[in-house]
Amino acid sequence: MILTCFAQNSSFAIGDAWDSMGIMDEATGSIESINSILDSHTDYNKLHSSTTEMQSPFEYENSTVTSIPGDKENKEIKIIEFYGLNSMTEDEIRSKMQLKEGELYTRSKMAQDLKTIYDTGYFTEKMKAVPTLNSDGTVNLKIVMEENIPVKDFTIEGNTVIPTEDIVAVLKDMKGKPQNIGMINEAIYKIQEMYNTKGYILSRVDSVTDDPDGTINVSIKEGIIDKIMIEGNEKTKDYIVARNILTEPGMIYNENLIKEDLVRLYATQAFKDVTREIEPSEDIPDAYDITIKVKEQRSVSISVGGGIDTVTGLFGSMGISENNFRGRAERISLTGLAGTGVILNDASVKSHMNLQAELSYFKPYFFNADTSLNTRLFFRDFGSYQIPLAVERRYGAEMTVAHRLKFNRHASATFSLGAENISVKEGDFDKIAGLYRKYNVPLSERAKQLEGGFFLSLSPALLYDTRDSATVTRHGTMASIRFDENIGLNGLNKTNGKLTGMIKQYIPIAKKSSLSFTAKAGGAIHGDIPEVMAYRLGGPYTIRGFKMSGVGTGKAFVMGSAEFATPIPFMDRTRISFLNNLRLTAWIDAGKVFDGTVSNIIYDRPMYGVAVGVGLKVFVPGMGALSIDYGIPLTNGGRNTSKHGYFTFGVGDLLY
């Protein structure tokens, strides 16, 4: 038997190849079939591949069967004999037939059985049944068949992205058996699925043929890219779009890689929509042209906003940004913020306005597509929540280079170089002096608390992020580790180093909820860390249910959290994205501070704490996750902590 698949637009006609398959008459003919190929793939939302299929020409209703003498009808079958079986067994054939020994013979059942045997796919159409009437009135039935050529070996052509052994593994069950159209069709489907699941959606089985020696030859067209074109960019330079497209002409088309390219383009924030179209190449057969279509958005924006945060208090903000600076997808922005200061009447924080300003510049392509550069100048003036009743002022500059690691696309490394001046001024000397006397702490310790400095910081870090979404996360992992070396430029004795790390794991619950577990820890590696740079626990981002730094401050800490998040019933079914991203939360936080500061003594801070609570969380574009939580301490929080707990307000998640 010859099995042949042809490419699209090939001509084929069965004609009279199948004249008859009958009882008493021997029919002859050949089996041929034709493939369908991949659709044009021009619709972005309906891209799919079709399956080549070997077609059987047998249709019993359209064949001619020679009439059978009526004296054999409805006679008991004495013996059924089979001729022409080599690889197949009689039991395998008998199990497919309606007619059995001891039952009555009918022409119609015999014809149907011949069709059923043929439909197993192991036999040619050269098939006949010979009923013979015995002297005792029974019928002997002889069935003559011809098995297809047995499969001896396989050859695979055209594959480059899928190993030959993987394709042969799909075909190997056919080896040693007669050629079978059904099994070949199933193998073709599995091969194309193998390509599709890996993103090679333009790949197809182009043809399947067999040699007289029983070798089956499979030819594959994998879908090579001829040209990549860009449309829709007016302000953005062509090379800016092109360098974000890592897919190149000559590569095998992969939908997964193209999606990553589109996400990378969208992440530049220069475009409001990015799509791709696929068309067959006019120059190269079986190749495709890819068109990347972009729609640019207004790159200059002015923002005015406000909100509430435990650290900043009630605040208002204003900013101006250019997200496609010079048409190179670079971002430059200037923002300012003014807040009332730490809220909830924290007695350790000086009532002082929180003023902030920042000028930043982001270059997404720094040396190569996997490396970016972010620089910023900043200024902050606020009532310190690190140093009791003091006013803290910080200004400086920082440059951060981020590089995505090639061995794992979810991992990236960063290195920050910064210079920062930190000054801490007395805010309420009389009150702080009274606290020092009350707890018998020498007043000379206050000078150490107010110690700032001018520091050069070197901060390498590793980040790992597999979250399914940055808005409503349900599964994935987020982890980081960072080392900060702070070199005292106005006194080397102030030089210190510390190591901080965190890991957060999300687990999906039901259809829309999630459970997350977080662990954080950090500590001094060397040097004497000034109190203004110490770790703190208490307040948002740490242990909720306590005031800012209410658990304690120190040179090291460890903490953990567990949080359950779920949509508010019916609120996630609206067309308002703000409401779709709203989540109810229930959580528990616990942690401990080590090697505490003087502030823990004068404010009776326990240096460890456990709290439980509930909250609301919503993702706001441009700001991140906003959260409001109410927590109740389960452990003794000291004299300055309410047993009834506190509200805390937070913006975003801290990675370090």
Image (tube, rainbow, N blue to C red):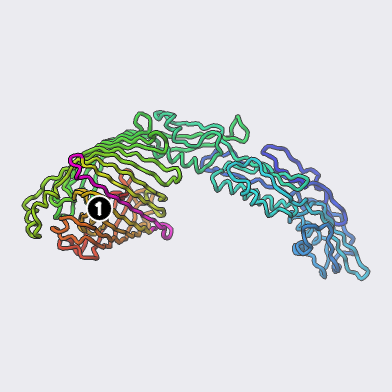
Please tell me which residue is depicted at 24% across the width and 63% down the height of the picture.
632
Residue 357 visible in the current orientation? no
Find residue 159 and report its image quarter: top right
Q: Nearer the viewer, residue 293 or 312?
A: 312
Residue 637 in percent (x, y) is at 20, 63
Residue 168, compared with residue 160, is above or below; it is: below
Q: Residue at x 64, y 42 (%)?
A: 220
Q: Would residue 504 be counted in the magenta stretch? A: yes
Q: Quadrant of residue 85?
A: bottom right
* Above or below: residue 266 compared with residue 116: above
The type of residue carrying mark 1 is Phe
Provide residue 556's location: percent of width, then percent of height.
25, 55
What range of the chain is rendered magenta?
489-514
Answer few, some or many: residues within 10 Å of disc 1's Cα (few below 14, many 20 plus, some between 14 and 19).
Answer: many
Residue drawn at point x = 70 percent, y = 43 percent: 5
Q: Secondary structure at mark 1?
A: strand
Q: Which residue was labeled with disc 1?
A: 649
Q: With 342 as the anchor, is 102 left or right in this view?
A: right
Residue 13 % position (x, y): 76, 41
Is residue 162 a member of the stretch shown in magenta? Answer: no
